[in-house]
Amino acid sequence: MTTTAPAGTLRRDDRGHPGRWLALGVLTLALLLVAVDATVLGLAIPFLTEDLRPTSTQLLWIGDSYSFVIAGLLVSMGSLGDRVGRKRLLLTGTAAFGALSVLAAYAGTPGTLITARALMGVAGATLMPSTLALIRTLFPDARERSFAIGVWGAVSTAGAALGPVVGGVLLEHFWWGSVFLINLPVMAVLLVVGARLLPESRDPGRGPWDPASVLLSLLGMFGVVYAVKQLAVHGPGPAALGAGLLGAAGLYGFVRRQLALPVPLLDMRLFRHRGFSGAVLADLLTVLGLAGIVFFLSQFLQEVQGRSPLQAGLFELPATLGAAGTGLVAGAVARRWSVRAAVTGGLGATGLALVALLALRPGSGFLFLGCVLLVTGAGAGLSYTVTADVILSSVPPAQAGAASGVSETAYELGAALGIALLGSIVTGIAGGPASAAPAAFTDGLRTASAVGGGVLLVAAGAAWGLLRGQRLAGAVRG
């Protein structure tokens, strides 16, 4: 890969850029906002429902459109960053994300909010792979890079868990649109500081960006996810079948085109690497098992238990602490034991914690929920951080953006599928809003948690086989 370093950016010493740790702090700002934004809306749902009066279908789209669009564009945007410059793409996406946050905050109709959330997904897709790819540039030393990815993973998983806390604080004092306006000051800092501090990196030899591949990727991902959503909500029918066939055709066309292009957006040969494929699968199933539970747990705490938004957010704080703690030590754990032990252990712990929610009752207290969420966050933080390191270490530096896009696609696709599938279990059993049928809603949440836990336990078994022999760069062979 050819790396450009314009005047005024950082120059390398023997281990990387002298200001690399400060630059990492700037990158985590962008990641933190995207991660928080994926979950902060959960607590605001009752408030915006009262204000905008969305239908049940519109409400699901308000929750899902952001993740759907990100999932469809991450690989394409990661590859675009490899070509035009990761810093340039990051700062452009930052400005767009801030402007669209204002549109979402002041949306006057459900349709406007859904549109704003979808466009925020486009901007968010430029941010997430750029942050991870720039870490590859900033930290050429394998052990330093592993710790930096640990920080990145901790912020990613903890940020998602922190969303309800941030939302709770804001909703105690302001209207629901404030959960979007919180993005603006952070985005301003990122634009000003990032423009001066972050190094530019690109690969001029990657060839032109292929719009046809972008459209096929978006069509394929959106079609498949929409089909799953229709099946979950309405059961088999023409809409689900048509969307599924369209999505499958789009993904098939995308793969065929990548294999035919001399310089593809995504090198499909990466998936021949067992460690790469295993890490991607673990990411997807981890988030699938968690996302729907986190989304509906916020409603359980408010509408079943009658807690304020701030109290509900604080109840979910142990997940943030657990994810942050294990994310920071994940690389050391994987080197001390093994990659597959770390990932399998994280997935298994998270799966068992979700299964423990079978004991959930409408009156369950903080001790029970706090312990479950602490283990859930710790397990997810450990597995997700190690798999991100595996994915980034499995590819040449020139493909860092595209590989990062694959990692984030698995995350966002898992989130969308989790909300659609597990959410349909909750709503199907509850048969109505949580406030109207608290016992039934709790039954639905228990069942969905058990299903999500089962998915994670299956993922743990798959990871044990697929990640056999996988090591992080810099690990000592025993």
Image: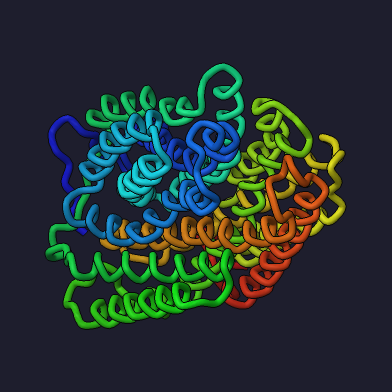
Quarter of the figure that contains the C terminus: bottom right
**Residue at left offset 74%, top offset 43%:** 436
**Residue at left offset 27%, top offset 41%:** 93
Looking at the image, which is closer to me, 238 or 353? 238
Q: Position of residue 429 (x, y in %)?
A: 74, 59
Which scheme is used to colour this image of the protein? rainbow
Q: In this view, does 70 lie above or below 391?
A: above
Left or right relative to 147: residue 186: left
Looking at the image, which is closer to me, 333 or 46? 46
Q: Where is residue 297 in the image (x, y as percent from the top left)?
A: 69, 44
Q: In this view, does 184 lie above or below 63?
A: above
Question: Based on the displayed image, in which of its 4 quarters is residue 247 positioned?
Answer: bottom left
Looking at the image, which is closer to me, 403 or 372? 372
Left or right relative to 54: residue 255: left
Q: Position of residue 392 (x, y in %)?
A: 41, 59
Left or right relative to 363: residue 164: left
Can residue 173 be seen here?
yes
Can residue 146 be seen here?
no
Count of residue discs? 0
Looking at the image, which is closer to me, 343 or 297? 297
**Residue at left offset 35%, top offset 52%:** 129
Q: Position of residue 270 (x, y in %)?
A: 37, 74
Q: In this view, does 84 lie above or below 370?
A: below
Quarter of the figure that contains the N terminus: bottom left
**Residue at left offset 25%, top offset 66%:** 215
Left or right relative to 280: residue 365: right
Residue extending farthest top: 173
